[in-house]
């Protein structure tokens, strides 16, 4: 079986058109408790959710670090989705470990344990074959390392990224330098407020665009996501109506994976400085595919749902989003 | 000038097609403080916001009570929008008075004063000419009074309503009896959770539909609104991207006014028990018009923006909602 045949069974539309996406971030083990169940030391981490989601749309390469507890059964999760893990470094010790608990309202989460372990000294090492990657996703790691990866991939045409409150507060200048090198920031509502000091999300998004990105997506959890583009474009989609949120861990990273994967198919040469109408249509569809992947991620503990997800199920859910968001022009 | 000519200057599409909407609720004076300004003893109340918003779409009749502080200048606000206030009773004493303060995040509001005054003993008195009203809006008052108004209008074909935490907690059985007489409930997300004991909004909406309504709209503040219909229909729209929320007081009542007013034009004979495709299309557009009116209400203190709002501005904002929510079918 050739590589192109094997990907054609698991990607949307023409997989040959999709360029590779390089993702850097955490590969971790998570212990998760909710009022409805628990999962112990299951595979997680931002790069894991991202790459499994993006692999529905494009070939994915991962840069990360794991410890000695990362075994063949964990490798298999990536390999089954044709994710290239040559860039996952093995280090002595244990992998990043996170334990948390969600309340009945899944928006309320309590961290019980964070053990950085091998992730504490993470320094991304890109295999030579990764340096030509045209699309990058700089996941939530120290902003200096995000910038380093960006600079090691001079050919990149489209660069997406994420950050978090911890870096916004501890390294604000580095976060700004990082934003200056990004095309697309995908960020939580709370983080957008913290980054800009603006309580109003729409103002916060405009401030972020002034710092460099051509587009910013504000993820609003169950309420959906909003897209802002340089030059004044705006789009918003509500969340998928999940009656049972099993485990929201990784929903934001899965959103980013769906969005960047779709862009790797449809904008491999990047976005205009001020995204034009065609760019904006692609970005809107990418936000919806991000929402699709985020919604699937919540349906099972850990990455279970993403592992077994079919291309047909992804397409059906996109159509469900079409149906739930549609209304007629006024009569 | 005939009545039909006078309404045609202020309503959307064919005003002759719109049947009258009877609204019952509070007419009040509000003192409002925000980080950006303040307004002292301005005209407010649920029936006021509702009727000014609904008057963009249909003739409106109001049932309420005011005190001796309600003068000709306040009457004029209603009359300028052709709202019939024959049903507003004048009682000795002062009108309902509310004072509150919003934080920089307009979702956080603190009540400083509530003086029920003449509203404490409110018992709706319907003018004889109101009893044939085909469309009712039973605003947030004691559920027993809501039921009483419903029963005094046996010809009503479409009944919408609202309630609040206070009644849900103090008179749960009466609230359930009220819901059994409603076609459409419009309610906040927090109230939907409280009413049903379900943390998940989608489950909460399903429970509410089991109690009687043919449709329920859950208002999610800045995040938008969601529509659920008996038989499984679902629609969601994000909020309008207001960069400056001057005063969110009355946004929910204005939403209800836009929604019921539009339904009075397009569903004067009511909804199917399980809304069919045509009903659902109308309900979706009504939710968008509700969102339009709610967004305008936030732009100025009190009812200022609703007073001067033109039909053309309403139409433009509907088109903006179309533009911000649209995305293509997958290519």
Image (cartoon, coloured by chain):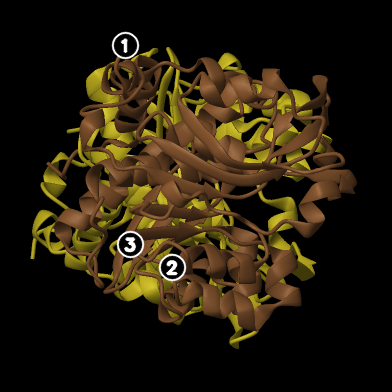
Chain colours: A brown, B yellow
Residue B10: horizontal and vertical position, in percent? Answer: 19, 62
- On the question of residue B152 being in view, the answer is no
| Residue A84: mark in rendering | none
Question: For mark 1, what is the residue?
Answer: A1
State the CA–CA distance, disc 1 to disc 2: 37 Å
If you read the primary sequence from the N terminus, does the residue marked by circle 3 or circle 1 appear first?
Answer: 1
Q: Is residue A252 left or right of residue B82?
A: right
Q: In front: B221, or B265?
A: B221
Q: Is residue A121 above or below residue B15?
A: below
Same-chain check, marks 3 and 1: yes
State the CA–CA distance, disc 3 to disc 1: 30 Å
Question: For mark 2, what is the residue?
Answer: A182
If you read the primary sequence from the N terminus, does the residue marked by circle 2 or circle 3 appear first?
Answer: 3
| Mark toward the viewer: 1 or 2 | 1
Residue found 79% across the figure and 38% down from its top: A67
Label 3 SS: loop
The residue marked by circle 1 belongs to what chain? A
Residue found 88% across the figure and 47% down from its top: A115
Label 2 SS: loop
Q: Is residue B207 above or below residue A96?
A: above
Q: Crowdedness of circle 3 by 10 Å Cα count: few (<14), some, many (20+)?
A: few
User: Residue B249 is drawn in which quadrant?
Assistant: bottom right
The residue marked by circle 2 belongs to what chain? A
Q: Which residue appears farthest toward the right when viewing the image?
A: A112
State the CA–CA distance, disc 2 to disc 3: 14 Å
User: Residue B286 is drawn in which quadrant?
Assistant: top left
Question: For mark 3, what is the residue?
Answer: A155
User: Residue B90 is drawn in which quadrant?
Assistant: bottom right
Label 1 SS: loop
């Amino acid at each position: 079986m050739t590589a192109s045949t094997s990907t054609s069974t698991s990607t949307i539309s023409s997989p040959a058109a999709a360029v590779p996406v390089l993702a850097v971030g955490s590969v971790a083990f998570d212990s998760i408790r909710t009022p409805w169940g628990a999962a112990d030391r299951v595979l997680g981490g931002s790069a894991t959710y991202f790459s499994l989601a993006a692999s529905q749309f494009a070939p994915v390469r991962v840069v990360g670090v794991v410890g000695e507890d990362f075994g063949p059964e964990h490798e298999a999760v990536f390999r089954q989705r044709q994710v290239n893990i040559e860039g996952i470094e093995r280090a002595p010790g244990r992998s990043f470990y996170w334990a948390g608990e969600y309340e009945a309202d899944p928006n309320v989460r309590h961290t019980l344990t964070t053990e950085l372990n091998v992730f504490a000294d993470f320094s991304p090492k890109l295999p030579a074959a990764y340096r030509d990657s045209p699309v990058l996703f700089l996941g939530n790691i120290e902003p200096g390392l995000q910038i380093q990866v960006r600079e090691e991939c001079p050919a990149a045409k489209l660069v997406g990224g994420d950050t978090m409150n911890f870096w916004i507060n501890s390294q604000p200048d580095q976060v700004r330098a990082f934003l200056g090198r990004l095309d697309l920031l995908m960020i939580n509502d709370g983080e957008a407020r913290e980054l800009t000091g603006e309580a109003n999300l729409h103002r916060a998004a405009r401030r972020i665009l002034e710092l460099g990105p051509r587009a910013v997506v504000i993820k609003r959890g169950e309420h959906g996501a909003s897209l802002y583009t340089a030059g004044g474009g705006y789009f918003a989609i509500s969340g998928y109506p999940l009656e049972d949120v099993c485990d929201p861990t990784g929903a934001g990273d899965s959103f980013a994976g769906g969005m960047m994967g779709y862009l790797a198919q449809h904008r491999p040469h990047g976005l205009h400085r001020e995204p034009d109408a065609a760019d904006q249509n692609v970005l809107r569809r990418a936000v919806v595919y991000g929402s699709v992947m985020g919604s699937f991620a919540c349906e099972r503990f850990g990455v279970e749902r993403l592992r077994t997800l079919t291309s047909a199920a992804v397409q059906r859910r996109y159509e469900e989003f079409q149906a739930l968001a549609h209304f007629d022009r006024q009569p």
